[in-house]
Amino acid sequence: MTRDPTIRPLEGRDVAPIAAAFRDLGWDKPRSQYERYLSEQQEGLRSVLVAFVRGDFAGYVTIKWDAGYPHFQASGIPEIQDLNVLPRFRRAGIGTRLMDAVEQTASERSNVVGIGVGMSPDYGAAQRLYALRGYVPDGRGLASEGRTVSHGNTVTVDDGLILYLTKTLVGRAPQETHGA
């Protein structure tokens, strides 16, 4: 088991090592993405939590306070986005610790949090993680590129085919969430 990670908010000094780690994996996660995340964090639009193990970048997660998914946005539900753990740190509890931290952060502003998960086998581990953490479908079915898929629609199974889930956070007084 990997030593417990240090989890903290994203800082400017983190941008280059994060971008380099994903570049080394051949993943399309450019430096500009993390510069935008840092800017959005500074503006209060997003919170970004990063995990380091013995000084090495291990993963991150973000929460968008004004969600991109229309139902979450209309209901005032913050949306967890972009949970990533580097392959060499997987199956060591890093994703769980990041989710614990981001849910705690979300609970400071809301009693419900949302998340979207892809429907391809590439997202199988995330699908299981979210189910085990108590996330349930929001009841609106699948979405493709942010739009609800209707009966009879033809869609492509890719990163844009999403099932949106919500979770009621413990420790918050209930408040109206418009059918979350």
Image (cartoon, rainbow, N blue to C red):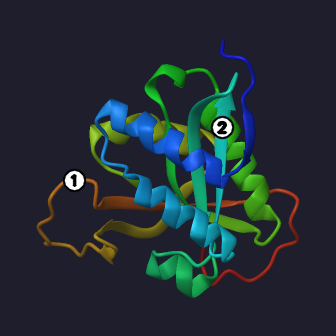
In the image, taking residue 119 as reference, residue 20 lies left or right, namely right
In the image, taking residue 68 as reference, residue 4 lies left or right, namely right
| Helix, strand or loop at mark 2 | strand
Q: Is residue 129 above or below residue 154?
A: above
How far apart marks 1 and 2 lie (CA) works out to 27 Å
Q: Which residue is mark 1?
A: 158
- Classify the position of the N terminus by image quarter: top right
Quick check: marks 1 and 2 in contact, CB under 8 Å? no
Q: Work out whether residue 114 or residue 32 is closer to the camera in this orientation and state it.
A: 32
* Quadrant position of residue 12: bottom right
Whether residue 129 is visible here, answered yes or no, is yes
* Quadrant position of residue 152: bottom left
The residue lying furthest to the top in this view is 1
Residue 20: image location, x then y, percent = 43, 38
Q: Which residue is mark 2?
A: 51
| Sequence order check, earlier mark of 1 and 2 | 2
| Helix, strand or loop at mark 1 | loop
